[in-house]
Amino acid sequence: MTAIIETQGLVKQYGKFTALKGIDLTVEEGAVFGFVGPNGAGKTTTLRILATLLRPTAGQARIAGHSVEKERRAVRRAIGYMPDFFGVYGDMKVWEYLDFFAACYEIPKDVRATLTKDLLELVELSHRREDYVDALSRGMKQRLCLARALAHDPQVLILDEPASGLDPRARVEIRELLRELHKMGKTILVSSHILSEIQEICTHIGIIEAGELVTSGTLEAIREQIQIHRVLRIHLITRLEDAQTWLAGRPDVHAVAPVTANGKTDLQVDFSGDDEALAGLLAEMMAAGFSVIKFSEETTNLEDLFMRLTKGIVS
Ligand SMILES: Nc1ncnc2c1ncn2[C@@H]1O[C@H](COP(=O)(O)OP(=O)(O)OP(=O)(O)O)[C@@H](O)[C@H]1O
Ligand SMILES: [Mg+2]
């Protein structure tokens, strides 16, 4: 697989504040890369640099082999960018809006008519073509904006929270649309602060926090990280405190704390290891004479992983 988006040591400073602290990001051709992080993490800053709208303070970024600083025109041809907030050209009709942006990309007039029609069909706005942009709902505006980003048939789509502020149905529609674009062979870099929302459509995930890339990789690799890093619930008849001390002394236990629910106190254990290591832990507890009557793993999903990773606990 070839990398189509690549950044090396990307740094962005706003005055004295460092918003990006050296981001090394690689997105492979054909990937749907979910760029996830909490508010203020640096997602928009990164995406704006990639879209050539913001200059990095240090470091490099290339898209389809072109430098975002030195070959801005080539980069702009290669990408379709959807900002997190778009200025509205409210007094244009839907079709005029698309026609206008296609003209900006120097697409000939006779081609534009068919193009506009196709794009409106793709984002399911054909029935609104004669309406003013102002009259569209937020979800429709977002889809129109996506159509606009596609006008020059770019290889790469850079989408900044395309589903933000949409109702559940409109979110699903955006997701379906991204799926379709993925099938068409586009590489998609899409940001979100809600991991669970985009994990379904992503092939890769990168998690950013406070200007640093905490982790990135294929969806499976990220899932594996969850399994290696797990949360256990252990219930004992007696010697809870002894067990807590014993567990805390192990290198594969990161944290252990008593938790009380329904009048019963369990130990909650933050543990690193595969299934075999887990079985080994139980065997050792039994051998050490602890009266374990419950030994179970809390189900973790990607959202939990995200919460833990962004708190700095990485296995
Ligand atoms: N023009 C600016 N001047 C000063 N600071 C800025 C500017 N733009 C962004 N920042 C700061 O840089 C940090 C990263 O902002 P950025 O918008 O990239 O985050 P984000 O991950 O997109 O967040 P959100 O999820 O809220 O969209 C934040 O602390 C923000 O306040
Ligand atoms: Mg943002």
Image: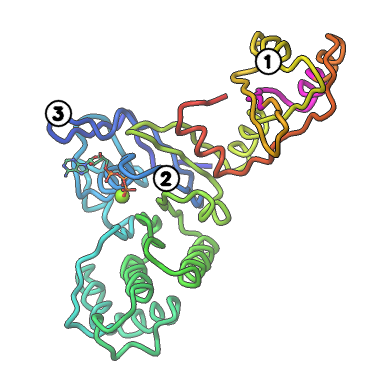
The quadrant the C terminus occupies is: top right
Task: Identify the amino acid type marked 3.
Answer: Lys
* Residue at mark 3: C-beta within 8 A of ligand 1: no
Disc 3 and disc 2 in contact, CB within 8 angstroms: no
Q: In this view, does 243 lie above or below 299?
A: above
Residue named by callout 3: 16
Residue 32 is one of the magenta-drawn residues: no
Q: Is residue 230 above or below residue 200?
A: above
Q: Residues within 10 Å of mark 1 (few under 14, many from 20)?
A: some
Residue at 54%, 42% in the rendered image: 1
Marks 3/2: CA distance?
Answer: 31 Å
Picture quarter containing residue 257? top right
Picture quarter containing residue 102? bottom left
Residue 60, percent across and down? 28, 33
Q: How crowded is mark 2: few (under 14 residues within 10 Å), some or many (20 or more)?
A: some
Q: What element carries label 2?
A: strand
Task: Identify the amino acid type marked 1.
Answer: Gln
Task: Identify the amino acid type marked 2.
Answer: Ile
Residue named by callout 2: 4
Marks 2/1: CA distance?
Answer: 49 Å
Question: Which stretch appears magenta?
Answer: 268-281
Residue named by callout 1: 244
Q: What element carries label 3?
A: loop
Residue 239, percent across and down? 77, 14
Residue at 34%, 81% in the rendered image: 116
The residue closer to the viewer here, 291 or 1, is: 291
